[in-house]
Amino acid sequence: MCSILGVFDLRQGADLTPLRPLALSLSARQRHRGPDWSGVYTHAQCLLVHERLAIVDPAGGAQPLLSADGALALAVNGEIYNHRELERALTVPYDFQSGSDCEVINALYRQEGADGIARLNGIYAFALWDAAQARFLIARDPMGVCPLYWGHDADGRLWVASEMKALARHCADVAAFPPGHVYDSRVGAAVRFHDRPWRDHAVTQGVSVEPATLRAGFEAAVHRQLMTDVPYGVLLSGGLDSSLVAACAARFARQRVEDDDRGEAWWPRLHSFAIGLAGSPDLAAAEVAAKALGTVHHGYTYRFEEGLDALPDVIRHIESYDVTTVRASTPMYLLARRIKAMGVKMVLSGEGSDEIFGGYLYFHKAPDARAFHDETVRKLDALHLYDCLRANKAMMAWGVEARVPFLDLEFLDLAMSMDARHKMAGPGRMEKAVLREAFEGVLPHEILWRQKEQFSDGVGYGWIDGLKAHAETYVSDAMLAQAPLRFPVNPPQTKEAYWYRDLFEREFPGEACARTIPGGKSIACSSPAAIAWDPAFAAAADPSGRAVAGVHLAAT
């Protein structure tokens, strides 16, 4: 994982060379993502800057990646998990210049143009320049795991960067680049390259997936994402999702597989990491899971005041004022610093499972399978604005890459092809039961069947309660009443939301930045549409899972 920055100007007579110092200074604002090396490519119509976090081929693989003839220049933030398979399937010869998994993007472009992007299975955001054709591509992975922003400067040049902070004060129209899309300068518009039949509920009706098939599919996803040449670990909150990721990773680590074909490094002992306030539910559950799995476990505690002190930096890094995102990002940001100090550069995490399997507690109120399915699709579409944003930016604030096996494209196609009636929760059936049943016997019973705790709840209920109490002292009733005048885009509805928005505006002023974060009511991380599932939701709307009365064991 790294950061990229690019600027393009296809007008006749363009000369971007004088902008090199500016591009370097803007790229430096996101250098925390790539502390290992910086690279620059300069052309009259294109500038590319890359800040590298070396995970695969650390000795080589410096970017931007150039083709042998120098005509192609590629800056990538990401990992391509199926690069070996793609390389073997090439029909147009390409002379690889590095051991980087990302260079296959150049080869696919040479062979298929922009169409080749749809064959990538990975997490990525990239800018590719073709000097011979004065043409460029910009693309982002289908789930938006890797962040990407774009906008225009006052002279009409197109800029692109991994984080908004590099463009916020330079491009008045800065916006998030849409996941699963490619911008080809020949076309002049962002075009979706990733679309799936399972988005339509009717296509999934009557489809079942055997537990053994579901389990094998997820294990394969974890195996693919263990592609690394540096020490790695797992985030282990003690919840179902992170524990399943850890269980699969621990199994492969114990095998110490020597797989020359994939070129992987298999580290002999797996380290796991958790964080919470003293006495938090997650810390206790993580200890149980780690002991059962045999990981080298590191459970860290933080004090409320430490989280409070970190909030301005957290919001600057995650580039969001969404309440749930800020709540959950803060302990993750603190944990990332600890992980970095351990010398670990990559971790596996459990994001995506709740969106695929309807794991949030409000899904208990889904009226039917169609509503359930449609909400999972809405949640997946928005992941790049919430959990993917949090996991990526909170970790990358300290140069730690987070990978998310549940969002592996092959596994996603398998799990989302299933009729939602098999996923539904309700009286006598726990959320994500279909996933729990597939892994029966892999985890201790109390972990496999632990109720869903959102990360911001699981680190300790005192965290959210303390934030709300502090907001009461920071924001007056009069300030909240005037919120629509100060913040016309997505005006905050609570004092806590106002507080986060104030901190956000200091770093990211202007309506364009504010519009990168969606608004609307939510209960327990629901989309606004799901509020209609229960009349009580509208009155009790809060992003905490404890807001779902009658479902959460510690409902407020």
Image: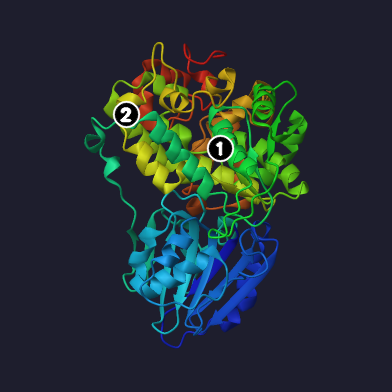
Residue 449, position as x, y percentages in the image: 52, 19
Name the residue: 48% across, 13% down.
Answer: 549
Residue sticking out furthest to the bottom: 13
The kind of secondary structure element at disc 2 is: helix
Instruction: Kindly report which numbered mark, 1 or 2, lies closer to the viewer in this rendering.
Output: 1
Label number found at residue 113: none
- Residue on which the image places disc 2: 420
* Quarter that holds the C terminus: top right
Inspect the image, locate mark 1, and give the three-letter code of the amino acid beneath it.
Answer: Cys
Question: Which quadrant holds the N terminus?
Answer: bottom right
Q: Is residue 332 visible?
A: yes
Q: Which residue is mark 1?
A: 248
Q: Is residue 95 left or right of residue 311?
A: left
Q: CA distance from mark 1 to mark 2?
A: 25 Å
Which residue corresponds to the image point at 60% horizontal and 72% vertical from the top-left? 23
Percent position of residue 349, x then y: 57, 40
The colour scheme of the drawn protein is: rainbow
- Compare residues 464 and 393 and report the one nearer the observer: 393
Q: Secondary structure at mark 1?
A: helix
Q: Could you tell whether 72 is left or right of 392 in the image?
A: left
In this rendering, is residue 34 above or below 215? below
- Quarter-wise, where is residue 278 in the image? top right
| Rendered location of residue 337, percent (x, y) | 73, 45
Q: Is residue 266 above or below residue 71?
A: above
- Whether residue 479 appears in this view of the structure is no
> Which amino acid type corresponds to the residue marked 2 in the rendered image?
Ala
Quadrant of the rendered structure where residue 106 is?
bottom left
**Counting other residues with Cα less than 10 Å from the Cα at mark 1, is it few (<14), some (14-19), or many (20 or more)?**
some
